[in-house]
């Protein structure tokens, strides 16, 4: 028997646990904080939706001033297109024949651009776009130091740009990077210098292409861990910061970015075997532990926290009678990107009541 989903207006206690909840006041503060930096820099915001997975949240961000969304994969883009969002960057390469066909199908319904770092891939995209009699936007992904996908900055970008620019039915719109290797650098001055070097090489690559007669409208980069610097680097046209709207432990402790903890997982205490031990109904199947350890809110000093498949265990430094069996506790996810997808619904809450119910959708056929 399916568990009924409480409707807006219901008290938060009506939600069964474990459940992901978004404090809407803190969400607004995170959005305001991000937008203030972006607007002061005079650039555009294309927030990544790989964290929140919610068309409703994506629309909220567009209403607040975003120009569209960034997606990590084709299935995310499909969900956004189905929801009526029509300006999308897929910050990844789409290479298989079946996925290219699906990409072209989506392009009939929305303005979608995709990243490339290989000419054979560009040829395949060009042929598919020509067959469908449409134009597909592409951005060259540049490896500015993260050592993942992308071509090296400078002349390799120019050489690939020349070849792509000559292909029919492709609109070479610009360049993109993720300067992820800089996110955990300390001290702050060293981090800022590393970001400026990485993104500076992206901007210089775009300028080199322009000097070679190839227009480059878009220079896209900047996630939550870097946007405070990236926004203010001359030549950047848009940033993709997205996960910071929700906030999590990783952003605070690893990336050293001040974000409000808008996202929490609400759990129920199921056992108190000893005065120092708390067992609750949230394990690895509801909270990711891979990139950051979830942090309980409002509990006495912890000695340790650990997780099994369906349970969490807290050991306190000192004995305590609270929380009791049946009480609820809230935990900040260690990393929202790998937590949200474990759930089907996000609850937007304010003043102790549910204000929004956001389904989380991902078309598994298009993985």
Image: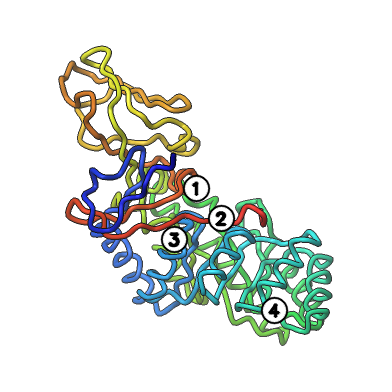
Residue that numbered label 3 is attached to: 242
Q: Which image quadrant is residue 157 in?
A: bottom right
**In this orientation, does residue 253 appear?**
no
Q: Which image quadrant is residue 299 in?
A: top left
Name above or below for residue 131 compared with residue 19: below
Residue that numbered label 1 is attached to: 341
SS at mark 1 in the image: helix
Closer-to-camera residue (239/290)? 290
How far apart marks 2 and 1 lie (CA) works out to 9 Å
Residue that numbered label 4 is attached to: 172
In the rendered view of the protein, which quadrant contains the N terminus? top left
Binning the other alpha carbons within 10 Å of mark 2 as few (below 14), some (14 to 19) or many (20 upward) gives some
Name above or below for residue 44 compared with residue 50: below
Closer-to-camera residue (242/226)? 242
Asked if disc 4 and disc 1 are in contact, CB closer than 8 Å, the reply is no
First along the sequence among labels 1 and 3: 3
First along the sequence among labels 4 and 1: 4
Binning the other alpha carbons within 10 Å of mark 4 as few (below 14), some (14 to 19) or many (20 upward) gives many
Q: Which image quadrant is residue 327 in?
A: top left
């Amino acid at each position: 028997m399916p568990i009924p989903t409480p409707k807006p207006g219901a008290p938060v206690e009506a939600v069964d646990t474990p459940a992901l909840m978004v404090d809407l006041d803190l969400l607004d503060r995170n959005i305001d904080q991000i937008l203030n930096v972006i607007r002061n820099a005079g650039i555009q915001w294309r927030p990544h939706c790989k964290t929140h997975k919610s068309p409703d949240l994506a629309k909220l961000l567009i209403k607040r001033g975003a120009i569209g969304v960034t997606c990590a994969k084709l299935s995310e883009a499909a969900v956004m297109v189905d929801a009526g969002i029509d300006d999308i960057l897929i910050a990844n390469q789409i290479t298989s024949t079946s996925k290219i066909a699906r990409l072209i199908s989506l392009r009939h319904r929305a303005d979608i651009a995709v990243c490339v770092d290989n000419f054979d891939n560009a040829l395949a995209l060009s042929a598919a776009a020509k067959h469908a009699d449409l134009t597909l936007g592409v951005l060259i992904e540049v490896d500015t130091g993260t050592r993942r996908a992308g071509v090296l900055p400078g002349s390799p970008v120019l050489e690939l740009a020349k070849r792509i620019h000559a292909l029919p039915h492709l609109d070479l719109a610009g360049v993109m990077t993720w300067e992820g290797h800089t996110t955990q650098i300390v001290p702050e001055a060293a981090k800022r210098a590393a970001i400026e070097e990485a993104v500076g090489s992206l901007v210089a690559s775009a300028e080199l292409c322009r000097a070679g007669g190839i227009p480059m409208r878009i220079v896209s980069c900047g996630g939550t861990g870097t946007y405070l610097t990236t926004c203010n680097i001359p030549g950047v046209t848009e940033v993709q910061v997205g996960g910071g709207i929700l906030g999590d432990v990783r952003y605070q402790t690893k990336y050293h970015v001040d974000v409000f903890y808008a996202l929490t997982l609400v759990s129920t205490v199921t056992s108190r075997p000893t005065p120092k031990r708390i067992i609750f109904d949230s394990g690895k199947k509801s909270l990711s532990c891979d990139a950051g350890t979830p942090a309980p809110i409002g509990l006495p000093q912890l000695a340790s926290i650990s997780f099994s498949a369906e349970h969490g265990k807290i050991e306190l430094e000192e004995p305590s009678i609270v929380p009791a069996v049946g009480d609820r506790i809230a935990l900040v996810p260690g990393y929202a990107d790998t937590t949200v997808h474990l759930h089907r619904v996000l609850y937007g809450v304010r003043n102790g009541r549910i204000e929004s119910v956001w389904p989380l959708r991902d078309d598994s056929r298009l993985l």
